Amino acid sequence: MNRTILKAFGIGVGLLLATAGAQAQDFKERTLRFAFQNTADHPVGLGLARFSDLVKQKSSGKITVKLFPGGSLGGDLQTVSALQGGTLDLTVLNTGVLAGVDKNTAILDFPYLFNSEKEADAVVDGPAGKKLHEKLASKGLIGLSYFENGFRQLTNSRHPVAKLEDFQGLRLRVLQLPLFIDIFKELGVNPVPLPFPELYPALEQKVVDGQENPINTIYYSKIHEVQKYVSLTKHVFNPQSVLIGKKTWDRLSQDEKSAIQEAAYEAAVYQRQVSRDQTVKSLEAIREAGVAVNDVSPSEIERIKEKIKPVIDRYSKDLDQDLVQEVNAEITKVRTGN
């Protein structure tokens, strides 16, 4: 494996290469089932196709990763439960969705935590990202690497959201997380928590006015076809955890673990770049489809931040304060160049 990639993720080069370079490698014929919410042609799906190919290659053709896109095996919470129970092997999802498993993962879903992809990379690829994944092991989940889903933006069928007051009264589908529900309530929204597979029909049937997701998800899941407005709020950046169930992990040999771990790191490097490149193209395609796209001014972003600050402060108090400080310190380092 490329040493630069290993270094970027803080991995001990000697440890991984020692097992990866072994001659008599211990691989068995296996098929691992990988469920996820995005479509197969979404950047997450493309990253997982690369992961599947890499696992096949690194296991001498013995391990097959079978992909189940589009929420075909259930929503995120159902998928996580299946991993913990051993009835499903792998998934990828927004790290903050795991707050019900370990509350500290909620920090990565804090609104306006990250100003750029570079800041997010520094956190998830550093000690804080590693610690967040380590905390999941006792809950039946092993974190392999971090993909990304980009900045979340707001869409709706009623009017553009250009200022704080425009949130008032909108009926929006939100993630099934207390943090998201409370944040949008604070903004005057009527939040409707729904699993992702139920989102499109809810928009189509006008059960909800709108929703919030990254641009690539809006485009590839065709959400823009049943929405009139996209407002670039950039309110949350979504790192995504690539996870394998501990019950599956414990059945693997050391060589199999090393092959899967290496594949997850290499696929993450590829997936993040694809995601960033495609976001620009997806936004342009949404505009060309006739959807009205509007920016939100920095002054209005500051008003939004101020409005939801009490919610963020309340949730922050419940987290590991050393971890919170570590995340903030890493972000500050990137912003100041120190």
Image: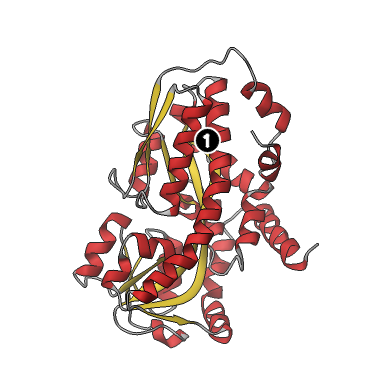
Q: Is residue 191 left or right of residue 243?
A: left
User: In the orientation shown, which residue stands out farthest toward the right?
Assistant: 338
Task: Identify which residue is drawn at 64% across, 48% down.
Answer: 125
User: In the orientation shown, which residue stands out farthest toward the top?
Assistant: 24
For the question of whether residue 75 can be seen, the reply is yes
Q: Is residue 287 left or right of residue 7?
A: left
Q: Quadrant of the C terminus?
A: bottom right
Q: Return the residue nearer the eye: 208 or 318.
A: 208
**Residue 233: image location, x then y, percent:** 48, 75
Q: Is residue 338 left or right of residue 144?
A: right
**Residue 124: image location, x then y, percent:** 61, 51
Task: Identify which residue is drawn at 51% across, 54% down.
Answer: 274
Give above or below for 177 relative to 183: above
Task: Identify which residue is drawn at 60% across, 65% down.
Answer: 114
For the question of whether residue 135 can be seen, the reply is no
Q: Residues within 10 Å of mark 1 (few under 14, many from 20)?
A: few
**Residue 95: image location, x then y, percent:** 50, 51
Q: Indicate the quadrant where residue 210 lies.
A: bottom left
**Residue 178: image location, x then y, percent:** 42, 61
Count of numbered circles on the image: 1
Give above or below for 246 relative to 203: above
In the picture of the structure, the residue carrying the numbered disc 1 is 138
Q: Quadrant of the N terminus?
A: top right
Element type where label 1 sits in the image: helix
Q: Indicate the quadrant where residue 333 lies.
A: bottom right
**The disc labelled 1 sits on which kind of residue?**
Ser
